[in-house]
Amino acid sequence: MSETAAGRGWGGQDVRRELHSELLEINMGPQHPATHGVLRLLVRTDGEIVHGVTAHIGYLHRCAEKIAEGCDWRQWMVYTDRFDYLAPINMNFGYAVAVERMLGVQVPERAEHIRIICAELQRIASHLIAIGTFGLDMGAWTPLLYCFREREEILNILERLTGGRMLYNYFDIGGLRFDAYDGFERDVLAFVNIMEQKIPEYDTLLSYNKIFIERTADVGVIDLATCLAYGCTGPVLRGAGVPFDCRKDDPYSIYDRFEFDIPYGEGEQGTVGDCWDRYMVRMREMYESCRIIRQAVDALPGGPVKAEDLKKLVKVPQGSLYTRTESSKGEIGYHVFADGGSKPFRTKVRSPSFSNLHVIEKVGPGMMLSDLVATVGSLDIVLGEIDR
Amino acid sequence: MEATAIHALLQSRFGDAVSDYVDGFEKGSLVAAGRVAEIAAFLRDDPALGFESLMCLTGLDWDGYDASGKGKSVDILGYDELGRPQASDRVGDGDLGVAYALYSHRHGHKHALFVRVPRAAPEVASTAAVWPTAAWHEREAWDLVGIRFAGHPDLKRILLDEDWEGHPLRKDYVMPGAWQGVPLDGRDYAACKWDESGVTLPDDVKRPDDVKQPEGSQRPEGSQRPESGNQG
């Protein structure tokens, strides 16, 4: 049982002992707005109190890892878009870095900078959805609309840049598919200027709203030991009080050149590792992303955006490598096994939401049913990458 | 700690259970399938190693792996070059394997463990008791590659349906032409007849019963189809 106020009556008595009924099995999902996709949670409840949670996944399974066996190395990039469809650029980034490390390719400076600008824009867009829909789960309709207003600006920039609004397929092994358009820097800076003013607006709307704090502080506490054991990463791990971020602790690309901080949960409104902490980590990460984008735009050099010495049909040397990068949801890892040919022999995708969702079976029991909704919302899962 | 030192430490502790040092893009140790769990517990609990985090667990099929480095891996079976269903009599050989990618937050070092098991008896000791996150990754490895994990608390399919035949990430897996009456191969839908009784497939579309999946595709003991309450 979690150490929360859940299950306490008005007089502080333990209602779990006094009021209990038969265990009832209910399905939350697969068609349920609070499960953020086609996820089915089989919940065993005693009245309002959760006694057991079993997650059933696989509704979106496409076996992209089998498809990889039939594509060549470059072709599979387009399938990585479809894992986390709210942050496809971050998924592309991980795969590109994984293959480039094995090939030993040096990505041109300009491509690295544009990659980081895109990845951080995408991180903001993904966090905006996470925050907006989390508010929605908690009964706050308005912030979602504000979040979509800013996300729209990001999508417009990415659409001008790549041609796509949802799935971009913009990264390529060894660089980018094509260069940025004229005025890209201007658009990005204009957006960042607006975005930095909007974050305090979300704070007044949602973060420090009394009802929101009541619903999220001290709820769904996931402590550090549980996070490590269950492989939770990203805002879930940072919410538990550890400033661990692959961008700093396992650096890739050129993140080591930029100055930014890693926000982490401090239990300001309740316990360290509660839903509010996870939420607030995302909110503060948007500031940090804006900081990175400013530095990357300032330092954006000219030059090519593709590695020149790379053939069209790349052949990755024999061997295996696990590469991880930081997506908006956590650590996206590609465990790539190459046999020297033009096709991936085996590519395992270790998706952050997969491990982040697993923990719900551990922390769910003992909660009130409404807190389960809050906890699932605060994990920010995307079923596309869980099911792959 | 350097990967070579970790390997030497493991070897001095576990003897024959830790064989080769793997020196590729990632550094690691080849270990015996039956003793992974105790090696894992040692890796986690030893203060000098401190691998409290399992980053990734990958199940894979080494069938068709070209050791010469030319990379002539097996194509996906079940279709001809025009996308028509095609039977395959290819018999898989080569081992199955599991790879573990470990990371220590305390010391900031990484290590990989590799396990190879014979295709006829693919059984690996489960590490779910050491790293709980392994429970789902092992279910996925069972589901997609067909590796059994001894001592797993609840080894059943996770991404595919409970009654799916075969393990898709095996190299000798043959794509079924249809599943529960639904054509899967993206071929001529106009050739299917639709009426009140459902869909009638053309004669040359394989049904799951026609496709013979390799040995070891059966459900493990103790894992039954879930009760009716689970069926939503």
Image (cartoon, coloured by chain):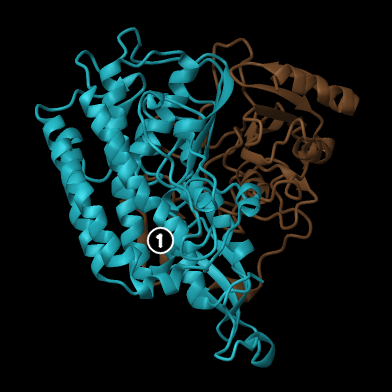
Taking the image as shown, residue A366 lies to the left or right of residue B6, namely: left
Which SS class for mark 1? loop
Q: Position of residue B129 (x, y in %)?
A: 76, 50
Q: Which residue is mark 1?
A: A37
Q: Quadrant of residue A178?
A: top left
- Which residue lies at the image location 23% right of the left edge and 59% below the top edge? A201
Q: According to the rendering, which colour does chain A have?
A: cyan
Tell which residue pokes out farthest to the top in this image.
A309
Q: Is residue A71 visible?
A: no
Q: How many marks?
A: 1
Image coords of residue A96 (percent x, y): 40, 26
Chain shaded brown: B
* Residue B32 sits in quarter: top right
Please name whichever residue, A187 or A335, is drawn nearer the observer in this view of the structure: A187
Type of amino acid under label 1: Gly
Q: Chain of mark 1?
A: A
